Image (cartoon, rainbow, N blue to C red):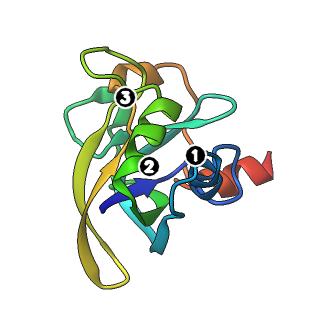
Amino acid sequence: MKYVFVYGTLRAGEINDINLAADRHAIARPRHLGLTSLSGRLFDFGTYPGMVAGTHDDAAIQADQPARVVGDVYEIDDALLAVLDEIEQVYPGVDGLFVSKAVSLEVEGERVDCLYYPVAPGAVAGRPEITSGDWVEHRRAR
């Protein structure tokens, strides 16, 4: 089993709902650990968001205060990882919009090592920032 932090269309009720993705491929549904946030900034790509991890070396994400991105943590069956990589178009040896990265974060008082899918910092140039850090809230308000 692995853990994944999802912040955009993979969240429950969204177009790529992680639970429905598991159902479509006859994989066990993931176990929801809880809602949390991760240091970074969220940008609007139209029908989906892109997150840039919270680093201080990219002018596109500089700010006076650290920003947070809201998302859910799930425990997933190893087989679901390939499905998520396909949804995010993450392929070994291929530079794409999304990349797969690891992060340690706290959810419901427990520290877990998660995978998540940020975008390359340069990809957000000219994209509007979602200042709330919450894709679901932002999408519903549009």
Task: Say which of 112 and 60 sits in front.
Answer: 112
Of badges 3 and 2, nearer the viewer stands 2
**On the image, numbered disc 1 is attached to which residue?**
25
Q: How far apart are marks 2 and 1 (CA)?
A: 8 Å
Q: Where is residue 130 in the image (x, y as percent from the top left)?
A: 57, 44
**On the image, numbered disc 3 is attached to which residue?**
60
Q: Which residue is drawn at 38% across and 27% down?
A: 90
Quadrant of the image containing the N terminus: bottom left
Label of residue 6 in the image = none
Quadrant of the image containing the C terminus: top right
Q: Is mark 3 on a helix, strand or loop?
A: helix
Q: Residue at x 42, y 65 (%)?
A: 73
| Amino acid type for the residue under numbered disc 3 | Ala
Report which quarter residue 119 is drawn in.
top left
- Say whether residue 29 is left or right of residue 91: right
| Amino acid type for the residue under numbered disc 1 | His
Q: Earlier in the sequence, mark 3 or mark 2?
A: 3
Task: Say which of 50 and 65 sits in front.
Answer: 50
- Image height of 22 relative to 105, above or below: above
Badge 2 vs badge 1, beta-carbon distance below 8 Å = yes
Q: Residue at x 43, y 20 (%)?
A: 123
Answer few, some or many: residues within 10 Å of disc 2's Cα (few below 14, many 20 plus, some between 14 and 19): many
Q: Position of residue 120 (x, y in %)?
A: 34, 25
Q: Is mark 2 on a helix, strand or loop?
A: helix
**On the image, numbered disc 2 is attached to which residue?**
80
View extreme (top): residue: 94
- Image height of 88 relative to 92, above or below: below
| Amino acid type for the residue under numbered disc 2 | Leu
Q: Position of residue 14 (x, y in %)?
A: 69, 51
Q: Earlier in the sequence, mark 2 or mark 1?
A: 1
Q: Position of residue 78 (x, y in %)?
A: 34, 53
